[in-house]
Image: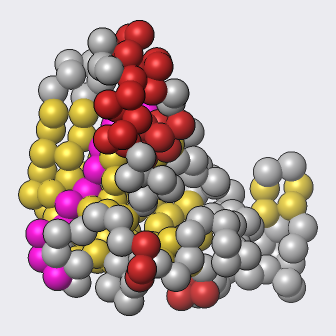
Amino acid sequence: MTTTGHQMDYSSPSLNLFFDLRYSPYFVKDDWNFILYQTAKQLPVMQGLSLVDVNLSREHSIEPHWHPNANELLYVIQGEIIESVLNPVTLQLLSYRVGPQQSVYIPMGWWHWTNAIMDHSRLVATFDNKNFEIVYGSDILRKTPPEVFQIVYGINAAQWAEVIKQVDQTVIIGPPDARGIRWRIGTNGSR
């Protein structure tokens, strides 16, 4: 496939417009809780877009996170979720109960998380960037030295270290249960 600058050559005989997300796991916790993804890396014709296909069972969540390089449009296909978003301008917490054929728009950089309230909840999130980035809350909590929490927030560093030691990896789909996890980010060769 050839490109001219940022334009695709749609006349190319090698033009590919198809991709099968089933072979592109982003994160798999178990058979009911997993995320598949597609970016321009997998399908180069998607020059300014990317997406994830999220499957969650009841009482599972996508951990709090934000996207520093993309706006997100979340669309529920099946089941029901509660999507919570923190407006950084007003500091208002916005929570939406979202079912099939309903969507939530999340501006770039806004802190948000997803809670499944029905089994077999499935949603698709699209991003206006060919390679979306994610900053996870579990990484912020576990990688910030406990002394910083003591200096900045007055939290006892030793007590905080004890509390946070259970969060020993990126969570992505919670609640954490390492026994069922098949693939973590970057360990299946596709990311």
Residue beneath the point at 74% across and 81% down: 16
Residue beneath the point at 78% across and 63% down: 8
- The percent position of residue 70, horizontal first and vertical second, equals 51, 43
Image position of 126 (left or right of 33): right
- The percent position of residue 168, horizontal first and vertical second, equals 48, 53
Residue 190 occupies which quadrant of the picture?
Answer: bottom right
Q: In front here: 121 or 152?
A: 152
Q: In front here: 132 or 145?
A: 145
Residue beneath the point at 88% across and 55% down: 4
Q: Which residue lies most toward the front here?
A: 158
Q: Quadrant of the N terminus?
A: bottom right
Q: Is residue 79 visible?
A: no
173 vs 167: above or below: below
Residue beneath the point at 64% across and 54% down: 131
Residue 26 occupies which quadrant of the picture?
Answer: bottom right
Is residue 64 found inside the magenta-colored segment of the image? Answer: no
33 vs 161: above or below: below
Write the start and end of the magenta stretch as one range: 109-119
- The percent position of residue 117, horizontal first and vertical second, equals 12, 69
Image position of 94 (left or right of 114): left
- The percent position of residue 123, horizontal first and vertical second, equals 31, 71
90 vs 11: above or below: above
Image position of 164 (left or right of 52): left
Q: Quadrant of the C terminus?
A: bottom right
Image position of 113 (left or right of 146): left
Q: In front here: 62 or 77?
A: 62
Q: Is residue 19 visible?
A: yes
**In this figure, which colouring scheme has been used for the structure?**
secondary structure
Q: How many numbered callouts?
A: 0
